[in-house]
């Protein structure tokens, strides 16, 4: 049986992988999964003065264990993974899109004077640099504001940490994922704007096309099961957090909106989207030393693994 060590993943970014693990789908494909516990909190505090992403380590949370040789794969947002693949010291590369399309939102506390994205002009929006909601915030806000009026600053990884800082007024707004969007709404917070975003899998050179194809077959079956009965899997978003965060334990699966849980078959990154993503990330001052997005993807593994998984 082939062993794969995966960095731990929350349901909002890895539900199909968690289901595949729990329901024995990886084992059925001849893969033994071991989880390497990463520091999901990463950065522990907000720094409203730190607004330059280049001053932050892209491996502050995701990818740190792979860089140390303690994991074979991890998944994170596609934009951040372009930057991590560009900065890797061990030759890691993206190998395709993950199965969950993550839902996230920019949220303000109930007494905030902000009601629309335009009213966030110049106001501090706390985001976890290099994580998905950092880039999503930029994407959403630049639809309403000139770039020089978008004022994001570094805030902790982990929605709970950012939620606490927002509620204390240390930042005007922040980005959240589930189940913290649901918790925030129950506490009277307002969702200012929201959207979905893709993520990708990143692998070391230990992961060949045959192994990744087997991994994808297990994930595809998990996707099929989740889509057949989403309500049956909503408890994952509560169970994962409630031991460390009892307030999440007060939520019920029916409090969560099944429509916010979108899972699809893992697939290659489309060439046109790859180029647009690369150009956009560079437009925000990142990937300066990367000449082509093809340098950030293991095209051989991506191509052959997804064909073999069909």
Image (cartoon, rainbow, N blue to C red):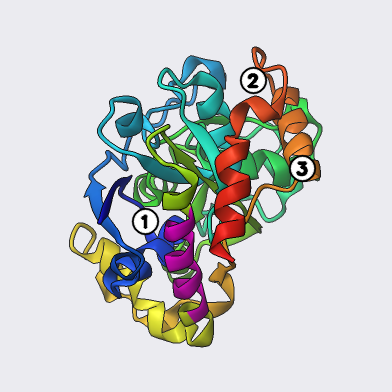
- Horizontal and vertical percent position of residue 76: 48, 44
Crowding at dot 1, Cα within 10 Å, few <14 / some 14-19 / many 20+, comes out as: some
Disc 2 element: loop
Give the farthest residue toward the top. Answer: 289
Q: Tell me where residue 119 sits by quadrant.
A: top right
Residue 43 seen in this snapshot: no
- Horizontal and vertical percent position of residue 179: 41, 65
Question: Which residue has dot 2 on it?
Answer: 287
Q: Is residue 79 left or right of residue 143?
A: left
Give the farthest residue toward the left. Answer: 243
Mark 1 to mark 3 CA distance (whole Å): 28 Å
Disc 1 element: loop
The vertical placement of 155 against 302, above or below, is above
Which residue sits at x=48%, y=60%?
A: 216
Mark 2 to mark 1 CA distance (whole Å): 27 Å
Q: Tell me where residue 238 sits by quadrant.
A: bottom left
Looking at the rendered image, the quarter that the C terminus falls into is: bottom right
**Which numbered disc, 2 or 1, marks the residue that appears first in the sequence?**
1
Q: Is residue 281 left or right of residue 198?
A: right
Q: Which portion, as a residue range, is magenta?
A: 213-224
**Which numbered disc, 1 or 3, marks the residue that appears first in the sequence?**
1
Residue 46 numbered tag = none
Residue 292 seen in this snapshot: yes
Residue 271 numbered tag = 3
Which residue sits at x=32%, y=43%?
A: 40
Disc 3 element: helix
- Horizontal and vertical percent position of residue 192: 65, 56
**Which numbered disc, 2 or 3, marks the residue that appears first in the sequence?**
3
Crowding at dot 2, Cα within 10 Å, few <14 / some 14-19 / many 20+, comes out as: many
Residue 10 numbered tag = 1
Crowding at dot 3, Cα within 10 Å, few <14 / some 14-19 / many 20+, comes out as: few
Please tell me whether residue 54 belongs to the stretch shown in magenta. no
């Amino acid at each position: 049986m082939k062993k794969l060590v995966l960095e731990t993943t929350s349901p909002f970014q890895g539900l199909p992988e968690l289901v595949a693990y729990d329901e024995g789908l990886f084992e059925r494909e001849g893969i033994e999964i071991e989880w390497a516990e990463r520091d999901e909190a990463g950065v522990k505090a907000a720094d409203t003065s730190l607004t330059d992403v280049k001053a932050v380590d892209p491996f502050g949370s995701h990818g740190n264990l792979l860089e140390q040789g303690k994991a074979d794969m991890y998944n994170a947002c596609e934009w951040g993974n372009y930057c991590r693949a560009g900065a890797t010291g061990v030759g890691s590369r993206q190998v395709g899109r993950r199965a969950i399309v993550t839902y996230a939102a920019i949220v303000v506390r109930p007494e905030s004077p902000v009601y629309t994205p335009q009213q966030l002009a110049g106001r501090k929006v706390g985001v976890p640099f290099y994580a998905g909601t950092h880039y999503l915030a930029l994407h959403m806000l630049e639809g309403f504001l000139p770039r020089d009026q978008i004022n994001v600053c570094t805030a902790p990884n982990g929605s709970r940490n950012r939620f606490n800082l927002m509620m204390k007024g240390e930042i005007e707004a922040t980005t959240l994922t589930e189940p913290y969007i649901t918790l925030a709404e129950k506490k009277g917070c307002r969702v200012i704007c929201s959207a979905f975003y893709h993520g990708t899998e990143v692998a070391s050179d230990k992961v060949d096309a045959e192994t990744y194809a087997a991994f994808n077959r297990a994930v595809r079956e998990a996707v099929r099961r989740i889509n057949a009965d989403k309500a049956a899997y909503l408890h994952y978003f509560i169970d994962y957090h409630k031991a460390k965060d009892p307030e999440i334990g007060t939520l019920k699966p029916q409090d969560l909106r099944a429509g916010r849980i979108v899972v699809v078959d893992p697939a290659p990154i489309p060439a046109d989207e790859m180029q647009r993503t690369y150009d956009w990330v560079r437009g925000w001052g990142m990937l300066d030393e990367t000449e082509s997005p093809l340098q950030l993807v293991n095209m051989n593994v991506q191509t052959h693994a997804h064909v073999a998984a069909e």
